[in-house]
Image: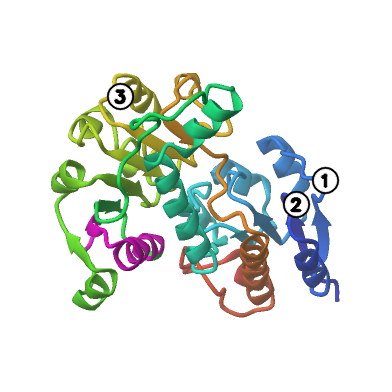
Amino acid sequence: MSRPKILIARAISPEVVTVLEQHFDVRSNQDDVAWSPAELAQRLQGMDGVLTTGSQRIDAALLAACPQLQICANMAVGYNNFDVAAMTAAGVQGTNAPDVLTETTADFGFALMMATARRITESEHFLRAGQWKDWRYDLLAGAEVHGSTLGILGMGRIGQAIARRGAHGFGMQVVYHNRSRLSPELEADCKARYVSKQELLSTADHLVLVLPYTPEAHHTIGAAEIASMKPTATLTNIARGGIVDDAALAKALANKTIAAAGLDVFEGEPAVHPDLLALSNVVLTPHIASATMGTRRAMAQLAADNLIAYLGGKAPVTPVNHLEHSRRSAA
């Protein structure tokens, strides 16, 4: 009996490729070529499963062109590259990779917030350019982190982990807004207080965005929301591009509507709005919040575990949709 065939759409840890080869006939893109949608569809012909990395769009058109495809396993906690409704209608299982990246991403989010508040990137550029000539009391003076108010928009696993770092490690007052309020036990663990979105914007000294991207969340932070923030505040986005109106943010930063921003995600990435690139009061990183070797390996392994389980006739480990019928059972 022939083994299921899977495609690994981008380069992943070689150790995980080896694990998958023990179960499947594997086609792997270890050269890490970024395929167009048409190229992806062509390479998915005859494939039972695909391991995606978040940049491969799985939609109705691709599913119609790939009738053998049964499962798409994302090695990311976010899955806005999946048209979940189309996948469910087509009987194709989707999975993601939550939990394994929570602490690493929270570390990075907090580090990016601190770098933004303390003007670290700006300071390094200043030094490298030979502009450091003497000491001044206000030389590149930034904002306090310890004891300040940390605002978190999106209080899932990563948001809670950032809250704990701020409250327990830096004595920050934590306020948050979320679609649903946390349990009293979780609020106590995070030392966090639930507030309205408007109160969050107006009271936070450092606002961190950790909410998932949905069409409804597009431009959750735009010109009006930024104008509601303190002029001394910082904004950090480790959520997804499109949560923030990057053009409005660039204008606000140029006008000093808020003090600074730290961005790991962008609209239309890897392209970055050119107005952001011209500013000194924004820290820019290339979507690397989960980028430690151990975490990236764990993310790929969880995607592999989902493929192994589902194509082996078992329930997926971390499903994002629930199927009434599937291509697997139809086959």
Tell me if I can see residue 327 in this picture.
yes
Mark 1 and 3 residues: CB-CB less than 8 Å, in contact? no
Residue 44 percent coordinates (x, y): 74, 50
Mark 1 and 2 residues: CB-CB less than 8 Å, in contact? yes
Q: Amino acid at mark 2?
A: Ala
Q: Is residue 322 left or right of residue 256?
A: right
Q: CA distance from mark 2 to mark 3?
A: 38 Å
* Residue in the foreground of this view, choosing between 83 and 164: 164
Classed neighbour count for the residue bearing mark 1: other residues with Cα under 10 Å, few (<14), some (14–19), many (≥20): few
Quadrant where the N terminus is found in the figure: bottom right
Which residue matches tag 3? 252
> Which dot, 2 or 3, sits closer to the camera?
3
Who comes first in sequence, dot 1 or dot 3?
A: 1
Which residue matches tag 2? 11
Which residue matches tag 1? 31
Q: Secondary structure at mark 2?
A: loop
Q: Is residue 310 left or right of residue 78?
A: right
Q: CA distance from mark 1 to mark 3?
A: 40 Å
Tell me if I can see residue 267 in this picture.
no
Residue 328 percent coordinates (x, y): 63, 69
Residue 99 percent coordinates (x, y): 49, 69
Classify 33 as above or below 323. Answer: above
* Residue in the foreground of this view, choosing between 228 and 140: 140
Q: Amino acid at mark 1?
A: Asp
Residue at 77%, 55% (x, y): give it.
46
